[in-house]
């Protein structure tokens, strides 16, 4: 916006005394430091009720920036008693309802040559503080909403100051228009609508559909009216629209977070829009969908520390599954920030879906593919330790310490096969396995129905084979299937089972080749029913 400009929409065609008064008032406002001041909405007909509507923009002002959100707040004030003067349109000899409105809109068309204003077709808010027709008065000067309107970055937004003269609408009908628009357009609507965000994302975050038809119906109330006024670009700063009877102050400011903003009802609006959205995440594409949603929200200007995790939790919770909710947060790296929000977020989530520190600590990799590299590194480290070379063993121990928790849980429950239960440091675990003759490791495979799904919450497994370091084969009975369990991304437990049938599953997954070592006895022993040798 320019630092200073002065344009009169239409000078009053009144007596010279009035002309001098209007000019003096205008100059006085300029002299008091306004960056912009202007008289608007005066058609210059003596028979009309002139409201002396004025628009001013006290400085300074700054352009809105892309990838940021902004809040538009309103303050209303009554300044004088409303007039009860009867006004008649002399051309049609009908009484006139006079009203004044402030419109926040995504579109604006400048007045025509006669000064008549076309009502914006894409209003975000329309505030009509009063409408009068002789004794019939609708006084709504406390109309300013408590919840701000939220807009994004460089999205074109205008403030339109308008005076309306109607021979077809009673005061109550005009006042009703503003409430109808407020009901149709929630505070965050403009951020999620298709022009601002891809429909594939917006439909998952907002339940407000196409507003064009309903909006046309609402605004058709003005079709036969005569409206005068002017619109201005809405930048960061303060704006004031005054008439002889009221003031409406509009303030635009950067919004750092929707979730932490005051009033908290803005947070409620955000949550309600997400839960009312027509589209839901599909269970088989939770990670990718949540990543796309997070990216779109960040691009729009929502905060990464509060708004994005808040939206993702409310979105993914609609699936009714804690694992899927965790998968969404893990895919977007928002698990910690979501947990830090505390009651601000979690008091609105049903108890069975509330995520705790323990839940996060025990999150397992989402798939075997995600766990495979870590299990492979575990196998390599054990192999280095068990080969007998001192230098290589030291490397293996150092590697184990990087990929395991401080202690790894080992619980020996059958025939003392692994030397008894214990919570072992990585080097102690390796020494235990060496002492029991388990020197070979390999044949990784996903945990499934044929190798113990449901016996642990691990997603990956490998074979631990009892054999000396100088041989390259062993019998099937000398191999144990091992499930791997993680805590905070590190290996925290190993669960070894005496289940030869599961061994065969891992062998088949690797064509019988366990890192160059082969299990040559194909006879499958009788199932033990998943007898547990070691558990967390």
Image: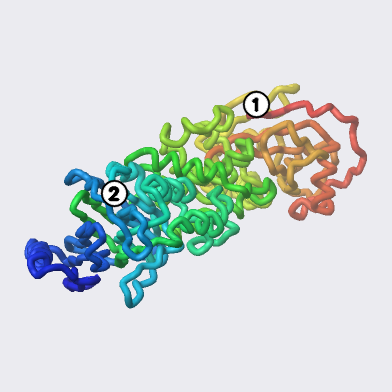
> Residue 531: image x %, image y %?
78, 26
Q: Dot 2 corresponds to which residue? A: 74
Depth order, front residue of 534/106? 106
Residue 5 vs residue 421: left or right? Answer: left
Crowding near pointer 2: few (<14 within 10 Å), some, many (20+)? many
Point out the image quarter for the N terminus: bottom left
Q: Which residue is mark 1?
A: 411
Circle 1 Cα neighbour tier, 10 Å, few/some/many (<14 / 14–19 / ≥20): many
SS at circle 1? loop
219 vs 437: above or below: below
CA distance separating discs 1 and 2: 66 Å
Drawn side of residue 13 relative to residue 478, left or right: left
Q: Describe residue 337's horizontal placement relative to residue 450 as left or right.
A: left
Residue 443 x/y as whole percent:
75, 48
Instruction: Please tell me whether mark 2 sits on a helix, a strand or a loop.
Output: strand
Residue at 61% x, 55% y: name it: 288
State whether residue 400 appears in this view: no
Q: Quadrant of the C terminus?
A: top right
Q: Which mark is residue 226?
A: none
Which corner quadrant of the image does residue 490 belong to? top right
> In the rendered view, would you say 26 is above or below 88?
below
Q: Residue at x 41, y 57 (%)?
A: 301
């Amino acid at each position: 916006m320019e630092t200073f400009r002065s344009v009169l929409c239409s000078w009053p065609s009144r007596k010279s005394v009035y002309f001098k008064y209007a000019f003096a008032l205008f100059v006085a406002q300029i002299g008091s430091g306004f960056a912009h001041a202007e008289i608007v909405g005066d058609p210059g007909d003596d028979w009309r009720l002139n409201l002396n509507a004025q628009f001013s923009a006290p400085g300074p002002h700054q352009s809105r920036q892309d990838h940021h959100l902004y809040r538009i707040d309103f303050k209303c004030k009554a300044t004088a008693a409303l007039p009860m003067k009867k006004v008649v349109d002399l051309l049609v000899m009908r009484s006139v309802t006079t009203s004044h409105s402030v419109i926040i809109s995504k579109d604006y068309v400048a007045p025509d040559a006669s000064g008549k204003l076309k009502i914006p077709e894409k209003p975000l808010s329309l505030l009509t503080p009063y409408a009068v027709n002789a004794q019939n008065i609708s006084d709504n000067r406390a109309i300013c909403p408590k919840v701000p309107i939220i807009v994004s970055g460089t999205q074109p937004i205008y403030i339109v100051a308008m005076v309306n003269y109607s021979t077809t609408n009673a005061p109550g009908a005009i006042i009703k228009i503003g409430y109808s628009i407020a009901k149709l357009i929630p505070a965050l609507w403009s951020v999620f609508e298709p022009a601002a965000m891809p429909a594939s994302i917006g439909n998952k975050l907002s339940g407000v559909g196409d507003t064009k038809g309903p909006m046309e119906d609402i605004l058709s109330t003005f079709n036969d009216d005569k409206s005068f006024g002017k619109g201005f670009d809405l930048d960061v700063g303060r704006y004031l629209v005054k008439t002889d009877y009221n003031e409406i102050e509009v303030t635009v400011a950067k919004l750092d977070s929707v979730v932490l903003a005051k009033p908290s009802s803005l947070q409620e609006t955000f949550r309600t829009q997400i839960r009312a959205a027509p589209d839901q995440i599909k269970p088989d594409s939770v990670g990718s969908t949540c990543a796309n949603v997070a990216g779109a929200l960040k691009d729009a200007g929502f905060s990464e520390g509060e708004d994005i995790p808040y939206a993702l939790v409310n979105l993914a919770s609609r699936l009714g599954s804690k694992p899927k909710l965790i998968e969404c947060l893990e895919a977007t790296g928002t698990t910690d920030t979501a947990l830090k929000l505390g009651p601000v977020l979690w008091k609105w989530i049903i108890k069975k879906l509330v995520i705790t520190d323990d839940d996060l600590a025990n999150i397992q990799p989402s798939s075997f593919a995600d766990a495979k590299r870590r299990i492979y590194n575990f196998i390599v480290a054990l192999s280095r330790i068990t080969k007998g070379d001192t230098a290589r063993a030291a490397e293996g121990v150092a590697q184990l310490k990087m990929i395991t928790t401080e202690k790894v849980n080992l619980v020996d429950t059958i025939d003392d096969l692994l030397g008894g239960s214990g919570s072992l440091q990585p080097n102690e675990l390796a020494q235990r396995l060496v002492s029991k003759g388990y020197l070979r490791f390999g044949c990784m495979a996903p945990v499934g129905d044929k190798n113990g799904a449901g016996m642990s919450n691990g997603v990956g497994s490998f074979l631990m084979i009892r054999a000396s370091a100088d041989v390259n084969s062993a019998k099937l009975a000398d191999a144990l299937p091992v499930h791997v369990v993680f805590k905070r991304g590190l290996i925290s437990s190993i669960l070894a089972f005496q289940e030869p049938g599961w061994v065969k599953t891992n062998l088949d997954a690797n064509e019988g080749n366990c890192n160059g070592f082969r299990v040559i006895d194909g006879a499958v022993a009788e199932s033990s029913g998943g007898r547990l040798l070691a558990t967390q």
